[in-house]
Amino acid sequence: MVKINEVVKKIKLLPGYKLFILLLAIGLLMIIGGKVIESVKQKETTTTAMETEIYNEQEKKIADTLSKIDGVGTAEVIITTIDKKTTVLVLTEAAEDPIVQMKIKQAVRTVLQTDNKNIKIIKKKS
C-alpha cells in the first residue's frame, strides 16, 4: 500500500508541483461548492412547494368560511405574498354589496392579519 507521505514527496519532485496542488484544490472546491449549491437549490424548491401547498389549503379554508357568511354566496380566494406583503383576492357573486364587502374584509383581515387595502373583492361570474 502506498503511503500518503511518499505520494506527497513524489509530487514535490515534479516541476510545477505547486500549480498542480493549487489546481487540485480548486477542482475539489468546485466539486464541493457545486454539491452545496445543488443542495441549497433543492431545499429552496422543497420550501416553495410546501409554501404553495400551505397557501392552497389556507385559500380553501378561507373560501369555505366566507361561503358560510350570510350574503356572500360561493367564494374563491387567492393569496399572494411578495416581500412580506400579503394580498388577498376574493371572488364572490355578492361583491357589489357593501355590507358583504365589509364582512369579507373583516374575516380575511382577522385570519391573515393584513390591511383592508390588501384585500380585493371582485364579482364572480354567475
Image: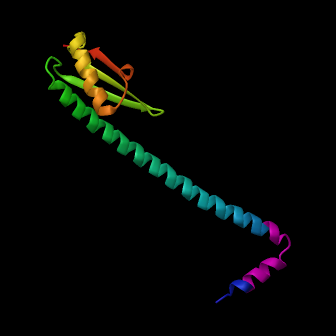
Residue 55 in view in this figure: yes
Q: Does residue 94 sit above or below 44 in this rendering?
A: above
Query: Where's residue 99, x and y in %?
Result: 21, 13
Residue 124 in view in this figure: no
Query: Where's residue 96, x and y in %?
Result: 24, 9
Front position in the image: 75 or 97: 97
The image quadrant that residue 98 belongs to is top left
The image quadrant that residue 64 belongs to is top left
Query: Where's residue 45, x and y in %?
Result: 44, 46
Q: Does residue 62 sit above or below 71 in this rendering?
A: below
Q: Does residue 28 sit above or below 77 in this rendering?
A: below
Asked whether residue 12 is drawn in magenta, I would say yes
Q: Identify the colour scheme used.
A: rainbow
Asked whether residue 35 is drawn in magenta, I would say no
Q: Quarter of the image containing the C terminus?
A: top left
Q: Does residue 56 sit above or below 70 in this rendering?
A: below
Could you tell whether 16 is left or right of 100 in the image? right
Front position in the image: 46 or 77: 77
Q: Give the extent of the magenta segment.
A: 6-19
Could you tell whether 65 is left or right of 15 in the image? left
The image quadrant that residue 86 belongs to is top left
Front position in the image: 46 or 27: 46
Could you tell whether 7 is left or right of 49 in the image? right
Q: Which residue occupies 77% across, 68% down?
A: 20
Residue at the extreme right of the image, as rendered: 15
Query: Where's residue 68, x and y in %?
Result: 14, 26
Q: Which residue occupies 41% across, 43% down?
A: 48
Q: Main secondary structure of the magenta part?
A: helix
Give the total number of marks visible in the rendering. Answer: 0
Front position in the image: 55 or 111: 111
Q: Which residue occupies 22% across, 34% down?
A: 61
